[in-house]
Amino acid sequence: MSEESSSVTASHRWLIRISDVFVDSVEEILQQLEATTSMKLGHEYYLIQTVNSDAVRQSGVSLFLRWNLPIQHSWPCHPQKMENFVEKAAQALFLKFGHLNPQTILVGQLNPNPSHIYYKGLASNLRGRMLQLFPSLKESKLDVEEQNSEAPTLFCLVGKEGLFCGMQSPKECNGLYPGGTKYISQSSPHTISRAGAKVAEALHYLLMYRSALPVDSAWLELGASPGGMTSELLSRDYRVTAVDRAPLDLRLNKERKLDFIRSDVATLQLREGTKYEAMLCDLNGKGQDSIKQVIRLSKHLKKNGLVLFTLKLPSVKTVQESLAVLDSVVNAAAVAGLYLLAKTHLSYNRHEFTLFFEYQSARF
């Protein structure tokens, strides 16, 4: 078993995940990361060597990385053809990381396609054996959701190309799960739209930064039609004021915690004193235009109120153009007292990003 890096505190080798949506921009992204070598692994993963160990975390293009992991231990092999792969891998990882007391161990697949059932079972079996070996984890087996987002976890990814591992906090990796955020199925016949999964995934991601809003919290949703996100918020027992020029799905007609305002968001006027714990904006059009409406209505947010904002990039083609739009949106929001808490690209995002803001107080 080869170990190209002897350090478990810093690495110039990284496993990064870039969504297929940005496949045409991969070369530009890798250049910005100062990658000297790269190898495609599994689905959406790239194993890269960088000039310095901070390039992945500090580069502006980190926005395009759904997930990242410093590679501190690797075994290039074909696990399906290896005898006793699980035991050999588990023993080697215990020798390498056992004394470092990770808060938990999580193992994922380089290709999570359901047809690759062998590697799903292999990942589960490897995690189970490692939990048996690590003394500090025998009695305390944290669930993914129970992790401290700022404490190091031993993450491992396995596939036909081999095993790749490293220790890093979920927040630094940009996801609680190996590979990123929790995948939300949209197979139910009761699903109104795929946007419901997008907000569910976003709220799951947000757990790394703040606690979930309590039941009965009030949301203002801008650009609600047909109601996929509305339905997801209602299913969490939130109160929702949904705004759109187009109607909502008829299945939402009898929802008692829903107030639907059929209006253009640009002309929406709310009653003075109306306050919300959170705002959700999934308006179509340019991000710079959408953030203006969020800023205009932000006076209706309570202190520390949450804004979940979809930064859409119609007609934007390059990485640098995308980053310029991001900067303009974030700067405009900050002047209005909306401070960027986190940013990411979700499974259900297309050529867009999800930004999270907290409302403090405006500078003007």
Image (cartoon, helix red, strand yellow):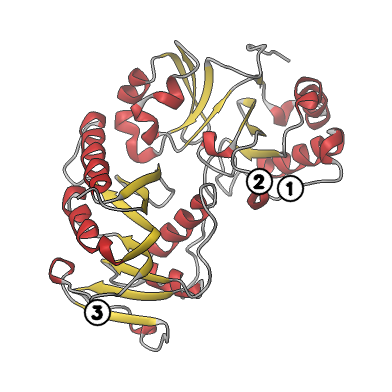
Residue 128 appears in which quarter of the rendering? top right
The answer to whether any part of residue 87 appears in the image is: yes
Q: Is residue 76 left or right of residue 262?
A: right
Question: Residue 190: x, y in percent?
Answer: 46, 75
Q: Is residue 299 above or below residue 42?
A: below
Q: Which residue is mark 2?
A: 147
Q: Is residue 336 left or right of residue 46?
A: left
Give the CA distance from mark 2 to mark 1: 6 Å
Q: Which residue is drawn at the image coordinates 67% and 21% (left, top)? A: 77
Residue type, mark 1 in image: Leu
Q: Which residue is mark 3?
A: 261
Residue 83 appears in which quarter of the rendering? top right
Q: Which residue is mark 1?
A: 142
* Marks 1 and 3, the one that precedes in the sequence: 1
Q: Which residue is drawn at the image coordinates 60% and 25% (left, top)? A: 161
Asked if disc 2 and disc 1 are in contact, CB closer than 8 Å, the reply is: yes
Give the CA distance from mark 1 to mark 3: 43 Å
Front residue of this view, candidates 210 and 290:
210
Q: Which residue is drawn at the image coordinates 29% and 78% (left, top)? A: 248
Residue 152 appears in which quarter of the rendering? top right
Q: Is residue 195 above or below residue 314?
A: below
Q: Which residue is drawn at the image coordinates 53% and 35% (left, top)? A: 173
* Marks 3 and 2, the one that precedes in the sequence: 2
* Marks 2 and 1, the one that precedes in the sequence: 1
Front residue of this view, candidates 149 and 254:
149
Residue type, mark 3 in image: Ile
Front residue of this view, candidates 195 and 298:
298
Question: Residue 111: x, y in percent?
Answer: 55, 38
